[in-house]
Amino acid sequence: MLESTLGKEPKSKFYKASFLVVIMHALQTLDAQTFNVKLAEALKKYKEIESPEWVLFVKSGHGKQRPINEEDFWYKRCASILRQLYLRGGFGVRRLRTRYGNRKNRGKQPAHFVRSSGKIIRMLLQQSEKAGLIAKATGKEKGRVLTDDGKKLLEGLN
């Protein structure tokens, strides 16, 4: 039996799982900011994902004092959301609102945490779903999860 396996490399049942862990670990070790910029550039090629006209006139959350002044905000936020879904699994709008929230300056009163805008996150999730990058979760998980196409897109950039 030993002679028959000498020329071959035995594949265990954990081979595929260990390969996925290596890819995911590589994505975790990359700098998030540079990865999100690369992913945002790739997302601009999808016709389903486009920023609405009103995005330059609204704040990204209740705790912000000024509107968004970044041209590629829509694509960068979409890239960040997709990266969060890849690393942490499926979740919905409420958890993402908490993730992107910030501290509100209330003048003389102590600052406290407020969640970000739900409309922006909801629209980004809907556009990503139309593009085929994410889908609504079924079974135990709730919210939305990445599809195979979404995983290929994220893994192809690192």
Image: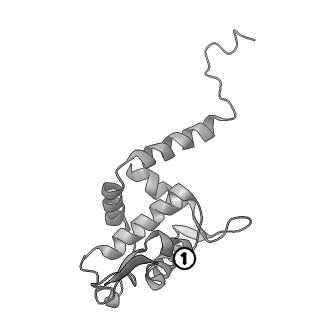
Q: Residues within 10 Å of mark 1 (few under 14, many from 20)?
A: some
Disc 1, SS: helix
Q: Is residue 133 visible?
A: yes
In the rendered structure, which amino acid carries the disc numbered 1?
Answer: Val
Residue 142 position, x and y percent, is: 66, 69
Which residue is identified by label 1?
Answer: 93
Residue 108 position, x and y percent, is: 32, 84
For the point 70% across and 13% down, the residue is 4
Q: Residue furthest top?
A: 3
Q: Compared with residue 122, is residue 149 higher up or lower down, i.e. above or below?
A: above
Q: Quadrant of residue 63?
A: bottom left
Left or right of 119? Residue 111 is left
Left or right of 110? Residue 130 is right
Q: Is residue 49 visible?
A: no
Left or right of 120? Residue 137 is right
Q: Quadrant of residue 14?
A: top right
Residue 74 position, x and y percent, is: 35, 76
Q: Compared with residue 150, is residue 57 higher up or lower down, i.e. above or below?
A: below
Q: Nearer the viewer, residue 67 or 123?
A: 67
Q: Nearer the viewer, residue 58 or 15?
A: 58
Residue 56 position, x and y percent, is: 28, 86
Image quarter (top left, top right, bottom left or bottom right) of the N terminus: top right
The colour scheme of the drawn protein is one colour
* Labels in figure, total: 1
For the point 31% across and 64% down, the residue is 41
For the point 48% across and 43% down, the residue is 25
Q: Nearer the viewer, residue 101 or 84?
A: 101
Q: Quadrant of residue 70?
A: bottom left
